Image (cartoon, grey):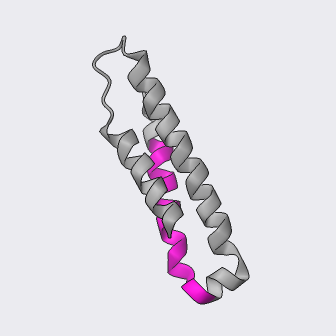
Amino acid sequence: MLLHLIAAGCCSMALAIRPSGTWDDDARAGIVLACALTLATSALALLITVAPSVRRAMGPWWLAPPLILGVVAAVRWALVD
């Protein structure tokens, strides 16, 4: 699904950004933005996947990618110093 790829891209961006020091507020803002975009995109993908017609066609294992990406983004957001 396209939303899973977008969420994965935002999540990888959040994991790849490293602040240069405690003074680097721009990097922290980038991490927060990438995490927020990952969570929003994952939530939208999860809502679409939960629909009964989609769930019958795609199967329940399609619920895993948005959940995993959302958890990774939430943990990264929580660990931003």
Quarter-of-image position of residue 20: top left
| Residues rendered magenta in the picture | 57-75
Confirm whether the magenta stretch covers residue 61. yes
Residue most extreme to the top: 23
Q: Residue at x 55, y 84 (%)?
A: 58
Magenta stretch: dominant secondary structure: helix
Q: Residue at x 37, y 16 (%)?
A: 24
Quarter-of-image position of residue 28: top left
Quadrant containing the C terminus in the rendered view? top left
Relative to 49, residue 76 above or below: above
Q: Residue at x 63, y 82 (%)?
A: 55
Seen from the viewer's position, the closer of residues 34 and 74 is 34
- Would residue 47 appear left or right of 13 to someone viewing this image? right
Q: Please count the marks in the image.
A: 0
Residue most extreme to the front: 2
Confirm whether the magenta stretch covers residue 12. no
Residue 21 visible, this orientation: yes
Residue most extreme to the bottom: 56
Q: Residue at x 60, y 49 (%)?
A: 40
